Image (spheres, rainbow, N blue to C red):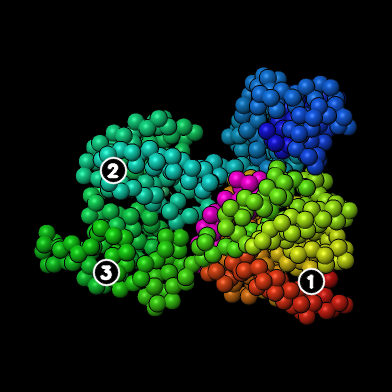
Amino acid sequence: MNNREIAEIFHSIADILEIKAENPFRIRAYRKAAQVIEDLSQPIKDIHTNGKLPNIPGIGEGIAGKISELIQTGKLKEYETIRKSVPSGLLEMLNISSVGPKTVALIYKELGITSVKELEKAAKDHKLAKFPGMGEKKEENIIRGIKILRETKERIPIYEAELIAKNIISLLKKVPAVDKISIAGSLRRRRETIGDIDILVASDKPAEVMDSFTTLPQVNQILAKGSTRSSVRIEGGRQVDIRVVQTDSFGAALHYFTGSKTHNIRIRELGIKKGLKINEYGVFKRSKLAEEDKKIAGREEIDVFKSIGMPYICPEIREDRGEIEAGLSGTLPKLIEIADLRGDLHIHSNWSDGTNSIEEMAEASIERGYQYIAICDHSKSLRVAGGLDEGQLIERQKKIDKLNNKYKNFQILSGIELEIHINGKLDFSDDILETLDVVIGAIHTGFSQDENVNTARIIKAMENRNVDIIAHPTGRLLGKREGYKIDIPAILKAAGDTGTALEINAFPERLDLADIYLQEAKEKGAKFAINTDAHSISQLDFTKFGIGVARRGWLEKQDVINCLNIDELQKSLEKARERSTHHYPPGQKKTDLI
Ligand code: DGT
Ligand code: CA
Ligand code: CA
């Protein structure tokens, strides 16, 4: 268990105690412990191993014992018990963005509400406003929070969908009746969330495939079972659809079931104009007598496109957002690929809130074939994430220099994920920033500011010549939080004007900047950086989700700065820094709004 997981459990215990209106001192002890653990710059596991838990200020003997239990067993008995002592609906309510334990306690006590659904009704019926600290605004926030919570509950994050699909496919591949198998639907198109998971199989023994599919160990409920199509619910409630077709229809079916529906309709219309019938079974030449339609293609997906005079269109852009026109006029983009990435420009180490050392992150990146990485630990004011101060930066630089002497064809860039304060001021002075290779400006506090405050705040940071990239530009957390209130077109434009790259943060719950903004940003002259924001080695593999977003946004490798090799990257960063100063010389700031 890492520091954050343990801190979350203590926060959760404090929440439950607060709902139950227990002793405030006890509540405070848990909260304090959670805070202290979040602030630690070292893995608590190591501190525990060294027997130094009792030395941490703010952690008493009792809490230290619970930390040991968590580290040793991965569980905490007290937590398991206390969780059962309140209706589970109350804990679910805590996931609503504007609802804390005090609100839950109040509505439970005063109105006997124990579920999210009841809470939504009460808010809509204005039954909450009369209580102290509530009001109409709060009711609105609750209703909106519940909507967001629901949307993500209904749709599956791509990260989870991919795990489910991979598991099922690896099991079905072992079934002899399965000839070919592929992911289809929105998961193949790499949407950020997935309604249901679609799998396509080619087989001449569909009944055997369906039997195998519906008796997989993870299947909880069979929603439908037929010879060409079945649907199940797996553990956790997620829906998986499967279709089985003949091998000589597999390509046509793959195209059809990959969608999107609007893309399919356009393709079918183009077929009709050419006297073709295109469906999930193949491409057919129409004759006057329907039964004489002659099948001319179906085995390979690309033949569907060829039949209407088009090159292959990658699944990620099959959304009827111009790909049909581009295909017809020969102007399809050459979409970026994972192999184009030369490095990762946003990686955390255990100098701030990462789990692994700089050296471990570097070696894992070398293994992945990178030429460089930028270690971008948090900056000083983000205490909860172990932000570094000026002194620690100097110490870290020594470590990085030493490692760089060791590596031959690999370079560790020294970077920072720099807090942008509410007034647009930066966490470090320009003198300090000058010494860093990569500066990523970021917002982690004060989300609730007005739109113009947040917009000016970010643009002001972009205008600083030393800020190279803006981290997760809209701040949304899929299913948890809408982005900050910002004027997105203005931010995209400022990125183009100042040469500050926009991050496509590949962390599965961020995927920020989202695909829908990328074309607009590109038109305004912006460049991008596809970064994982990895806090541990395994998270370095999040790149594939960032690449999915970039491809859906039609990006090519020349749009993305971390596709440059190290020399080109350094030149490009330098050029962008010059551009910021050129655009906004001192005393002529375009946005001195604050
Ligand atoms: P989702 O599941 O909501 O994330 O989105 P999809 O795109 O996976 O949609 P789904 O699962 O309903 O259907 C899978 C694909 O099957 C869809 O992308 C296109 C194709 N499809 C489904 N229904 C129709 C239809 O009525 N007409 C056409 N042309 N294609 C369809
Ligand atoms: Ca689907
Ligand atoms: Ca489906």
Provide the residue designation for mark 2: 178
Provide the residue designation for mark 1: 465
Q: Which mark is residue 307?
A: 3
Q: Earlier in the sequence, mark 2 or mark 1?
A: 2
In the drawing, does residue 380 fall left or right of residue 93? right
Magenta stretch in the rendered image: 532-554
Residue 169 or residue 14, whichever sits in front: 169
Q: Earlier in the sequence, mark 2 or mark 3?
A: 2
Label 3 Cα crowd, 10 Å radius (few <14 / some 14-19 / many 20+):
some
- The residue type indicated by label 3 comes to Ser
- The residue type indicated by label 1 comes to Arg
Counting from the top left corner in percent of width and height, residue 466 is at 79, 68
Q: Earlier in the sequence, mark 3 or mark 1?
A: 3
Q: Residue visible at 65% across and 73% down?
A: 568
Badge 3 marks a residue whose secondary structure is: helix
> Considering only vertical position in the picture, is 581 above or below 484?
below
